[in-house]
Amino acid sequence: MMIKRKIVIAVTGASGAIYAKLLLDKLQALQSQIAEVAVVMSDNAKQVWEFELDDTSHGNYPFKFYAKNDFMAPFASGSARFDTMVIVPCSMGTLGRIASGVSDDLISRAADVILKERRKLILVARDTPLNLIHIRNMQTVTEAGGIICPAIPSYYSKPKTIEELAMTVVNRVIDLIGLENESYRWEGM
């Protein structure tokens, strides 16, 4: 029997809304493997989505959306048993708050819960260049059990569009979540 995942998707205001959109699209297509998807977006995330994608569809997915300060959301507690959280894209400010244990909004609180419960936290970091504070925050989150998955696309699948290029990152995230997914796999040369 397949274990269905309970997944939190958090979207911050870092550039890279395409990653969030493609991940939500992919999760919608893989719903047979998923028990629940909960989504929380920062105010900046909505603005960046609309600006970068010329699109206002961020609230049109068949998932439950939560306000950024809704500490009554089920995934604000470990007893709700969400097993995976993906922050996509993950701003350096969000990374810093998680690394320092500051739970001042639902995104950082949920990340804190996922880490304390020893569940899977995936941060799709989207910034460049990195300063030493960013690198140390990544180290802290990694040592606490989180996974840093930089939004660095791969090219060996020879993507032809920006969506195909971004999907190389999203497919890695889907693999990290543990969902079955048809995607390009490196077979060597």
Image: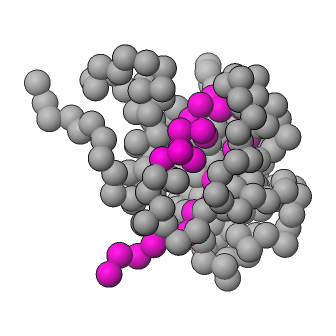
Q: Position of residue 53 (x, y in %)?
A: 67, 25
* Image-quadrant location for residue 68: bottom right
Q: Nearer the viewer, residue 11 or 129?
A: 11
Q: Is residue 13 visible?
A: no
Residue 181 falls within the magenta-colored stretch? no
Residue 15 falls within the magenta-colored stretch? yes
Image quadrant in which the N terminus is located: bottom left
Q: Position of residue 184 (x, y in %)?
A: 27, 36
Numbered range of the magenta stretch: 1-26
Does residue 108 appear to the left or right of 129 in the view shown?
right
Total numbered circles: 0
Image quadrant in which the C terminus is located: top left
Is residue 161 depicted above or below 35 in this figure?
above
Name the residue located 52 percent from the left edge and 32 percent from the top edge: 151
Does residue 89 appear to the left or right of 107 in the view shown?
left
Is residue 62 depicted above or below 139 in this figure?
below
